[in-house]
Amino acid sequence: MCLLANGGVYGRSRAAGHRLISNLKHIFLTRTGFFAWFFVFYAIAGFATLSQYGVHYDEITQRTIGIENARFLTGRATHADLQKHRFFGPLFETPAYLAEQVIYDSSMKGKILLRRSLLFALFLLALWCFYKLTKLLFQTQNVALLCTTLFACWPRLWAEAHYNSKDVFFLSLCIFTFYALFFFNEKKWWIVFVLAGLSISVRIAGLFLLLSVLVFYGFKPNQQKKSKVLLCGIGISILSCYLVFPALWLHPFEGFRDLLFYGASNPWPSGSTLAGFHFEPGQISGWYTPLWMALTLPLLHQLLFLVGLGILLKQKPNYRQLSFLALFAVPLIYILISAPTLYNAWRHNLYLFFPFMLIAGSSLDFLFKRAQAASIPFFSVVFPLAFLLGQQKHDFIYFNVLKNAWPPGSFTLDYWGISTGRALKQLDKQLPAGGKIYCFTEIVDLNRNLNPSFSKAWTSVKTPDSADYALVLNREGRLEKLQGTAIATEKYGNDTVWVLYQCRNSR
């Protein structure tokens, strides 16, 4: 009674409410500024759009890799069972499959959305780390905000973060490694090398990440026990890679040798079209990745990068700047010289966008010192978000205006068949149920996993001759021409993304 009489309960509740509001203000206004608001909006929009993208060709295959490795680790499979996918590490796939056991009785749609949720959550964590990295590098909150929003709102990255558990996961590991490198490089330096080793298990390009880490420690002034850190670090990275890569356990030396060869000469059978040139497997030119970057990165990003690169080269780069310059330059030089087998635009080298934007951030830092500080937060949030929202329909095949210099049909558009889900939704509305549909490989059946209602309307067949309708996707830049009448299509600029044919035997 005394407590109530003195207003103790009410007073404490009110004080707690004030503390909560004060903490939220500190997070959303003082500590991170507008970035926290952007981050929350971005996260909500990302999780809300997980199902807007169709199931790509490799999505179920990636899940299979997780299943095979989980069965091996639990003693229900042999090492020989891992050999089919021995070149692909299961660092994301096995935990994602184990997480599925929580919803074991759910439909495949629920399991796909769970996988995508885990991937997007990891990307969000990487995005937060990217912001902290840029804030440390440039010592200005608003520059970090602008650099991070421009990074996050590149349409292709936004799209890939929903479904690409290979390249976006590897990109995220690169960011985590650099976060540890910049913040834990003294007493907890071993964490850096653990993360670098884990990245090698995902993509062999993790060796470039390890090299950039070695550059950091090699040029870091006043580094204590430098030789010990470098030698022990390499050992830790190798051990970390092997620990999470069961396919290497039986034949560690031969397996890693084969992995190196596969990374350079991937014998994938499909070709790729760029700037009117159709490249057959193993015949990619060295300029393949640089030209894809020039055509798919926004011109603003490229301008900022060139200015930032000039600023860094004009001054003497410090050990931090040298580390991310190495992560960008060394792989690019390797690609230009050796021309490894690549396809599906430049998604294999998507991680280059991370150091690319750190270099671009140097120009933002330079410009900020000569701009009105008050205008930066508004520009940082509104412009990138407006840009992203304007590209929502075709964000996964975004090109800048330079693409207009080539005629239609000059580029690979939808190698992974992401647009199939959207195409089937449209076709399901306008065509009668019960027809037979043909499409390249099993892409229709894959998309039924995400949208089970399609199975009620269509029967998938393997040849166009036995189909009522045929869906032709622009995978490699060249559209297959079928006999029949084109009754529906979707365009990206002057290019055709897909065409629906009514076949001759259609009822």
Image (cartoon, rainbow, N blue to C red):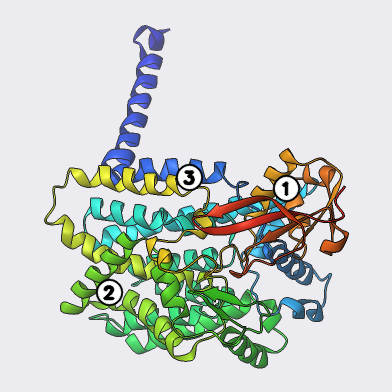
Q: Is residue 310 left or right of residue 499?
A: left
For the residues labelled 3 and 1, the Cα–Cα distance comes to 21 Å
Nearer to me, 142 or 96: 142
Q: Amino acid at mark 3?
A: Ala
| Residue pictured at 74% horizontal, 65% vertical | 64
Q: Which secondary structure lies at badge 2?
A: helix
Quarter of image, res 463: bottom right
Q: Which secondary structure lies at badge 3?
A: helix
State yes or no: discs 3 and 1 in contact (Cβ < 8 Å).
no
Position in image of residue 283 (x %, y %)? 57, 87
Residue hosting label 2: 321
Q: Amino acid at mark 2?
A: Gln
Nearer mark to the viewer, of 1 and 2:
1
Q: Is residue 180 visible?
A: no
State yes or no: discs 1 and 2 in contact (Cβ < 8 Å).
no
| Residue pictured at 81% horizontal, 40% vertical | 432
Q: Amino acid at mark 1?
A: Lys
Q: Is residue 86 visible?
A: yes
| Residue pictured at 30% horizontal, 35% vertical | 25
> Is residue 281 positioned above or below 44 on the image?
below
N-terminal label among 1 and 2: 1
Residue hosting label 3: 43
Name the quadrant of the N terminus.
top left
For the residues labelled 3 and 2, the Cα–Cα distance comes to 29 Å
Nearer to me, 477 or 132: 477
Position in image of residue 19 (x %, y %)? 33, 30
